[in-house]
Each structure stands twice: as C-alpha cells, then as structure tokens.
Amino acid sequence: MTDFYVFATGPLAWIAFGIFILGAIYRLVSMYSLAKAKDGSSIAYMSWYYGLRSILAWMVPFKSMGWKSDPLMTVTTFIFHLCFLLVAVFLGAHVVLWNTAFGITIPSLPSQFGDIVSFVALACCAVFAYRRFALPHVKGVTRCQDWFALVLVALPFITGVLAYHQVGSPLVMTTLHVLSGELLLALIPFTRLSHALFVLFTRAYMGSEFGGVRHANDW
C-alpha cells in the first residue's frame, strides 16, 4: 500500500495535472472556435472595461439581481468557494505538496481550522444537494452529471476529514483522499465543473454585450 501511495502522490499526481492543463486548453480553444463560428460578431464587441466591470460586480455578494433573488444559494456559493480555496491552497499538508512539487512557499492554515473549514464546505455541499431535491425549478433541470459533479467535489473533503481524524486505516484513507483530489482535478475540464474555466469569459461576454451594445448593466 505504501508503494501505491508513493505512486499516487508522484507520477499519478503529475498525470492528473497534465490532463487538467491539456483538457483546459482544449476546452477553452474549442469553445472559442465554436463561439467564433456561431457568433463571430461577439468577438468584435468584447470589451476589457465592460467585461471587468461585470466580473467585479458579480464577485460582490448580493450586488446583482441574480444573487439577491436566492439568498441561500448566494451565501452557500460564496462560502463554499472560499472554503475550497482555503483548503486546496493553504491547508498544511497541501502547502507541503506545493513546496515539494513547485518550490512554492506559502503560509498554512492551522490544522484544526482546516478541519472546521472542511466541515463547512461539506455543509455547503449538503445545501446544494437539498436544493436539487427540494426546489422544483432546480430539480427540473438537474441531471446525472450534476450529481456526479457534486459527489466529485465532496469526496476530497470527506476523505480528507476521515484521514485527519484517522477513521479506518490512515494510509488507506490518505491514499483515497489523494486519488479523489486527483480525479477531481483531472475531470474539471470535462464535467459541469468546467464552469471554473469559463465563468470569467462568460461574465466578460455578458458584460461586454450589455455594456457596449445594450448600454445597460448585466447585474
């Protein structure tokens, strides 16, 4: 099992990074080509000013009508993404990996704080699941790939919490945590999670159209 853990944290990790990077490039290039073929004029009115204005406006909780219309979703979304960033980048064990793999030294969160943040992220995942079950307008557009994406995001948190609290074999659980994180990373470009790649471009497109063409705000 130790040999497999070394493989998972070594070659397999680089494979996951490679799939993510190549997949992200492929998706971005293909989406740009598709947009250019179907609506070439949209490229002409893309504006840095209106695009950045839209992005910054939508990054402020409750500034847009979309955020105001669903307070639970707004709070949950912002908290989840903040928790994800804190754990993925600043958790102590992850900081060690950043330093080992890329020579990057960054401050780390206290382990107990990271544990709390992980539980908060899982609570957010539970809210996302509840909405898909309980709200008709969300349930009606929820598909299998949406559930798959939610499970994919939740698994690294679940296995990380179990590994931290030494539930079961620590080595097995840590290995599962590493594998779930690598699976998440590799599949981001090919699942619903690809919004992480497209969200800035989508907002820039919407902002440019509304600001430069319709002379209105898109929030």
Image (tube, rainbow, N blue to C red):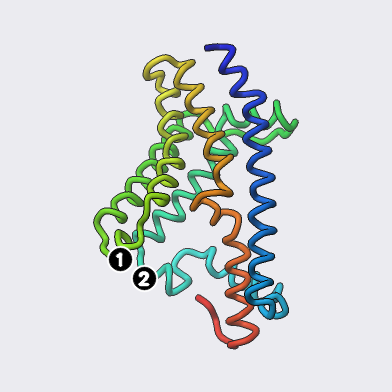
The residue under label 2 is which amino acid type? Ser
Q: Which residue in the rendered view is the most extreme toward the top? A: 2
The answer to whether mark 1 and mark 2 are in CB contact below 8 A is no
Distance from Cα at disc 1 to Cα at disc 2 = 13 Å
Frontmost residue, 90 versus 192: 192
Residue corresponding to mark 2 = 69
Q: Residue at x 30, y 59 (%)?
A: 139
Residue corresponding to mark 1 = 137
Q: Residue at x 71, y 29 (%)?
A: 101
Callout 2: 10 Å neighbours few (<14), some, many (20+)?
few
Q: Secondary structure at mark 1?
A: helix
Query: Where is residue 28, by image quadrant?
Result: bottom right
The residue under label 1 is which amino acid type? His
Callout 1: 10 Å neighbours few (<14), some, many (20+)?
few
Provide residue 113's location: percent of width, then percent of height. 47, 34
Task: Indicate whether 122 appears above or below 218.
Answer: above
Query: Where is residue 170, by image quadrant?
Result: top left
